[in-house]
Image (cartoon, rainbow, N blue to C red):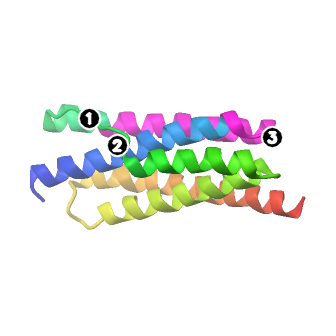
Amino acid sequence: MSNKKIIDSLHELIQINQESEKGYKEASENVNSKELKTILYRLSQQRALFRGELEEVLHKDYRDSADVQDSLASKIHRTWIDFKKSFSNDDDEAILAECERGEEHAIKKYTSMLDGQLPSYVEEMVNQQLSLVRGALSQIREFKYEADQA
């Protein structure tokens, strides 16, 4: 893979994590459950860490800046969370559904990057992050299931 494609891939993953960080932080501020607030805030911090790891590789190895902007899709996604919250009787369920959708999107993006084209050390980092994203999705689904049962 050319350096440009590697840089573009890193930018995409940085953007996904930047959007996830903001989305989880906003979600943590809008749920009622204290336990869920804590979990969502920690996921926001985790995504900031992922973003930092990716930015470090981008700066150190490719001498590129990681200045990425929120995508229109992420702004719409966060607006949708706010909209659902304002009209939903069960705010936590609506927010969890949006978090689930966001994680599914992140998993697709991460998986698309694992095509054997990235340098092995970058692919290893992406695989580790992907594993934790999948774990977060499982955790969100557990909370969603519990909310459905309540």
Left or right of 132 in this view: 30 = right
Of 130 and 65, the residue lying toward us: 65
The image quadrant that residue 14 belongs to is: top left
Residue under numbered circle 1: 66
Q: Is residue 30 left or right of residue 70?
A: right
The boundaries of the magenta stretch are 29-54
Distance, label 3 to label 1, CA atoms, is: 34 Å
Picture coordinates of residue 86, whole percent (x, y): 72, 45
Answer whether labels 1 and 2 touch (C-beta < 8 Å): yes
Q: Residues within 10 Å of mark 3 (few under 14, many from 20)?
A: few
Query: From this viewpoint, is residue 121 visible?
Result: no
Mark 3 in CB contact with mark 2 (< 8 angstroms): no
- Between the C-alphas of marks 1 and 2, the distance is 7 Å
Q: Secondary structure at mark 3?
A: loop
Q: Is residue 46 magenta?
A: yes
Quadrant of the frame with the C terminus: bottom right
Where residue 139 appears, as percent x and y from the top left, is: 67, 55
Q: Mark 3 touching mark 1, by CB under 8 A?
A: no
Q: Which residue is mark 2?
A: 14
Residue ID at (67%, 51%) = 84
Identify the amino acid type marked 2: Ile
Magenta span: predominant SS is: helix
Q: Which mark is residue 33?
A: 3
Closer to us: 45 or 121: 45
